Image (cartoon, rainbow, N blue to C red):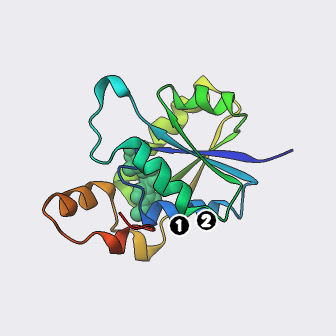
Amino acid sequence: MKRTALFPGSFDPFTKGHEDIVLRGLELFDEIIIGIGFNSQKNTRYFEVNFMVEKIQETFKDYPQVKVIVFAELTASLAKKYKANFLLRGLRNTTDFEYENTISQVNRVINTNLETVFLITSPKYAYISSTIIREVHKYQGDVSKFLPYKL
Ligand code: ADP
């Protein structure tokens, strides 16, 4: 059976930390669907969602088994729709853990076939967060070192 994982997130922006999780996830899964959670009714994004779709597609142009979608629904329902039995998430620290622990348990109650697989961040990317990148970018700082594509 094909092993499909959904990698959901805001990806505002998609970073080298995210890229690392996807590349390592490809060792485990046949297909990875990167899902950008986006609600057009309450758009609070810093980077435009379609722009981010393009940049992620460009990043994985050599990997046909990586797909990018935009969604505005429960992650567990979305996984069902795409026949993904796995959720892929990255863990940087205990704050991530506290949050992810609850979410993954709830997701499993909603969709019993859904197993969340956590990859511990590579130390060289552990400090990278989308929040920090937005902050640096807002004040005209150079964020190119944190991103796997050119802005
Ligand atoms: P969310 O809005 O759900 O927090 P993010 O876009 O911030 O989504 O992140 C998506 C996933 O990637 C989360 O599981 C997060 O922990 C993980 N992640 C974010 N940054 C890194 C990083 N530098 N290294 C590894 N995983 C990361």
Does residue 57 lie above or below 79 as drawn? Answer: below
Residue 79, percent from left and from top: 63, 33
Callout 2: helix, strand or loop?
helix
Q: Quadrant of the C terminus?
A: bottom left
Residue 147 quadrant: bottom left
Distance from label 2 to label 1 (Cα)? 5 Å
In front: 60, or 111? 60
Give, as a three-letter code, the residue at label 2.
Leu
Q: Which residue corresponds to the image point at 66% horizontal and 35% vertical from the top-left?
A: 114
Q: Is residue 102 left or right of residue 30?
A: left
Q: Quadrant of the N terminus?
A: top right
Q: Which residue corresponds to the image point at 43% horizontal and 75% vertical from the top-left?
A: 123
Give, as a three-letter code, the residue at label 1.
Asp
Q: Is residue 130 left or right of residue 84?
A: left
Residue 35, percent from left and from top: 53, 42
In front: 61, or 73? 61
In front: 107, or 62? 62
Which residue is label 2 attached to? 23
Which residue is label 1 attached to? 20
Does residue 56 lie above or below 35 as drawn? Answer: below
In the image, is the residue at mark 2 within 8 Å of ligand 1 by its beta carbon? Answer: no
Asked if the residue under mark 1 is in contact with the one under mark 2, i.e. CB atoms within 8 Å, the reply is yes
Q: Which residue corresponds to the image point at 64% horizontal and 27% vertical from the top-left?
A: 111
Other residues around mark 1 within 10 Å, as few (<14) / some (14–19) / many (≥20): some
Does residue 25 lie above or below 5 as drawn? Answer: below
On the question of residue 119 being in view, the answer is: no
